Amino acid sequence: MGIFSLIKKAVPSTRIVNIDASLGNVLLAGTSPRGMEMIMRNYAIDSLNNNAALVIFRDAKNGYSSYPSITTSNSMIYEINNEEGAISEQIDPFSCFSDSETNTYLINMFDNYSEIDKSKRMSYQNYIALLRSLLKKRGRTVKLNEYINYSFEEVERLNATLSMPETERNRNERFLNSFLPDIRELEAYFYDFANNTIGEILSGTRTMEKIFQTKEIIEISLDFTSKQKESEMLMEVMIDNICKLNLSAAHKSSIAVIANEIPNEVLIKTKFSKLIKNTRGCNVLYTVTDLTNLIEQSNEWIEYADSYFFFKQNSNKNKEFCSEFFGTYERTKESRTSGVSNPTFWDRMSGKGSSSRQSSTTYTTEKERVYLPDVFASLMENQAIYYFKKTNEHSRLNVF
């Protein structure tokens, strides 16, 4: 479906726009922080009033914070922050995955952190699977920052002493013997995640469901200046936890997600669009400064929104796109012509004719833009052009 097929014959609206969770998935596009913050605030408060779990992804330096805008009580917020030296809460993000999903997830994280040789990727994953399986037989689970505590020799000892069929023990032993030359490289990843910020954050004991049993908001502050890779990994695993969230276990009716000041490339890499397309009790509000850059990658960033707020646009490309988004309307143009009608020579000779004034009116239909590009350059900080897909209405409004 093309992006412009969404807005055929959109009609101007005169009704009051209620800025709340009923807006569904909301796209805020442009460069008006105060205007966007007002919409995010109202959207978040209404979501919380309707017993929604609220997750906020924000740029640690410039992103919208829930305190004190949404709440004046820090006790409502579970704060996760991957900035260097920041005090952060922890989370257990792996309990919602199966064993095989966790093994794959860990390898993907390590690979994103520092690329793994493709020829060694599967053997690394098999070693992690074996380590976790042996510890599970002992009734233990291992956190992300604890893998370094289990040496190769400890894994060999567990395989030799735990109760299991001999065929399984022998198969494990053959694998361990073949993997020995590569163990130091994998242990380097274990060491890094035992000492970096993301390893600490993702080594908690509380799942997202348990957090939401006592907290209303999870706010995730991401450092895109010096820790972009870690920020991307943290955001991606939290997105997958949101997709798997058990609302009943969390004692929530739905989940609302706000993403503010997240770079376009991060939205793409972390597969944030999964949340926009998620129809299982999840609504998303996301802000985008350079909209055309994002939708050049995929139309889904605009197709799956329900409500659109176009704020001031600084680039010609974005102004033109916003104007094209609303399309054209047909305007009837009236043209009048007038003149003097002179009689023919024979009419004058016979005395029948005299000059007379005549006029005529013609009507033509012309297409004009609903909003010209310059409209989007002249919007004030508190102004936006709004479009609601459900009713196919658009309007120009003041948000504060």
Image (cartoon, grey):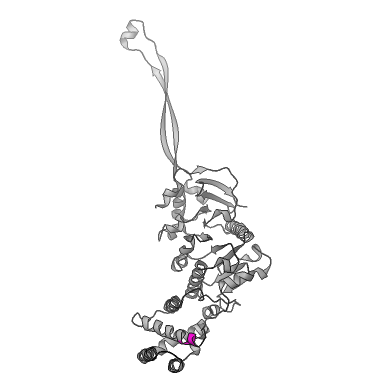
Residue found at the very far left of the displayed protein: 346
In the image, residue 120 above or below residue 304: below
Residue found at the very far top of the displayed protein: 350
Q: Quadrant of residue 169?
A: bottom left
Residue found at the very far right of the displayed protein: 72
Residue found at the very far front of the displayed protein: 165
In the image, residue 259 above or below residue 17: below
Give coordinates of residue 266: x percent, y percent: 47, 67
In the image, residue 17 above or below residue 166: above
Give coordinates of residue 256: x percent, y percent: 56, 62
Can residue 320 be seen?
Answer: yes
In the image, residue 393 above or below residue 160: above
At 45% across and 36% down in the image, what residue appears?
331
Q: Quadrant of residue 168?
A: bottom left
In this rendering, position of residue 232 left or right of residue 176 = right
Compare residues 350 and 125 and report the one nearer the observer: 125
State the extent of the magenta-drawn residues as a range: 134-140
Compare residues 259 and 253 and report the one nearer the observer: 253
Give coordinates of residue 367: x percent, y percent: 42, 39
Give coordinates of residue 63: x percent, y percent: 57, 66
Can residue 62 be seen?
Answer: no
Q: How many labels does the image show?
A: 0
At 41% across and 90% down in the image, what residue appears?
184
Compare residues 373 and 182 and report the one nearer the observer: 182
In this rendering, position of residue 62 left or right of residue 356 = right
